[in-house]
Amino acid sequence: MMETRFLGKSGLELSVFGFGCMTFSDGEGRFGATGSTSGADAARQVDLCMDHGINFFDTADVYAAGRSEEILGQALGKRRNRVHVATKAFHRMGKAAHDVGLSRRHLIEACDASLRRLGTDWIDLYQVHSFDGLTPQEETLRALDDLVRSGKVRYIGCSNFAAWQLARALGISERERLTAYIGQQIQYSLVARTAEEELLPCGVEIGVGAIIWSPLAQGFLSGKFRGQSGGNTRLELMGALKAYDNQRCRDVLAAVDAVVEARGNSVTHSQVALNWLKSRAGVTSVLLGARTDEQLLDNLAAATWSLTEAEIEGLDRASQAPMHYPVSMQYSYGSERYRSPFKRFD
């Protein structure tokens, strides 16, 4: 059975692994090059996910210029009410002034457009895809509250916010008695741990669950691309291969190697990296992304076993990164009063 967890302080219960639908595409539009899964292939991947206990599918209007939503809706068909569907709005979807951002006008129009593309009457989790520095948060939150009250949206979340932006939004929702964010979708992996400084502690403290994107660092943590070009992969297309070409990332892969080898190669590098994430404080669901059925099945197998405490500590030590100010200052000079859900090794 796939483990499920409640998202933040809500009754929305998500599978610990969800499926990210960025690869649902005809190969067109922004992010279209990250995948070209559609039609029967998309339906088969949705089948595999549901057969293995996944109840959570995440997409966005900007993925493949809306085609990802359409493909997901068609793949789910009459099974729509058996799963939770999340989508997002913020990015430019047209040339007009209000075809981007988090204004009331854009959010309401974007939500209606997503509902049509998904072929559904409601969105389980509607997320703002980024922070809009030009629109007051009060306006955004009021529009989202209206969408919830209308029945078009069940819950709301944010993505790629800073901790202070999330905390301020929750303060506004409490003050104005508006629907509040229950989830934050963030980047987090063994080679990208900055979320542990503020985002995850913030979520743990105030009850906002984390949904993780890029858990394998665009495929780097699969171990397939060390010392070579990523070729036509998401890792190469997203320009991340060079960013991971450093000693720390090589040390992380070595630590993953050690776990795989100690287990007699009965698990894969991807499964180790995904397992580490599901053990982290504040994490509700980790989004899997796969171009092929083989990749998807390998990732799904991560739900069938767990890392030991010793294995987790070994991965923690190898992947630990330097802290940044002001957290580094608090930890170094106020350690007697410092509190974090994450252990440091110094």
Image (cartoon, grey):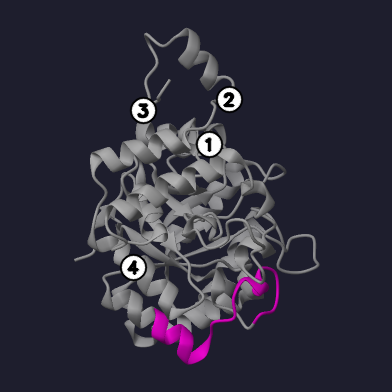
Q: Are discs 2 and 1 less than 8 Å apart at CB?
A: yes
Amino acid under disc 1: Thr
Q: Residue at x 47, y 87 (%)?
A: 41
- Mark pair 2, 1: CA separation: 9 Å
Q: Going from the N terminus, do you reach mark 4 or mark 2 first? A: 4
Q: Whole-Å distance between the Cαs marked 3 and 2?
A: 16 Å
Locate residue 145, reporting x and y percent: 47, 52
Q: Is residue 126 left or right of residue 280?
A: right
Q: Does residue 32 belong to the magenta stretch?
A: yes
**Cα gap from disc 3 to disc 1, whole angstroms:** 14 Å
Does 201 sit left or right of 24 as displayed?
Answer: left
Q: Which residues are magenta?
A: 27-45
The dot on residue 324 is 2
Q: In the displayed structure, would residue 308 be above or below residue 24? A: above
Q: Earlier in the sequence, mark 4 or mark 1?
A: 1
Is residue 305 depicted above or below 295 in this figure? above
Q: Nearer the viewer, residue 261 or 293?
A: 261
Q: Is residue 98 visible?
A: yes
User: Which numbered disc flags the more N-terminal residue, 2 or 1?
Assistant: 1
Q: Which residue is mark 3?
A: 343
Callout 4, which amino acid?
A: Leu
**Quarter of the figure that contains the N terminus:** bottom left
Identified at 66% across, 47% down, the residue is: 243
The percent coordinates of residue 82 (x first, y second) are: 29, 75
For label 3, count other residues whose C-alpha is less than 10 Å away and answer few (under 14), some (14-19) or many (20+): few
Q: Write down the quadrant of residue 279 in the picture.
A: top left
Mark 1 lies on residue: 194
Q: Picture quarter containing residue 43?
A: bottom left
The Cα atoms of the two marked residues, 3 and 4, are separated by 28 Å
At label 4, counting other C-alpha atoms closer than 10 Å, the crowd grade (few under 14, some 14-19, many 20 or more) is many
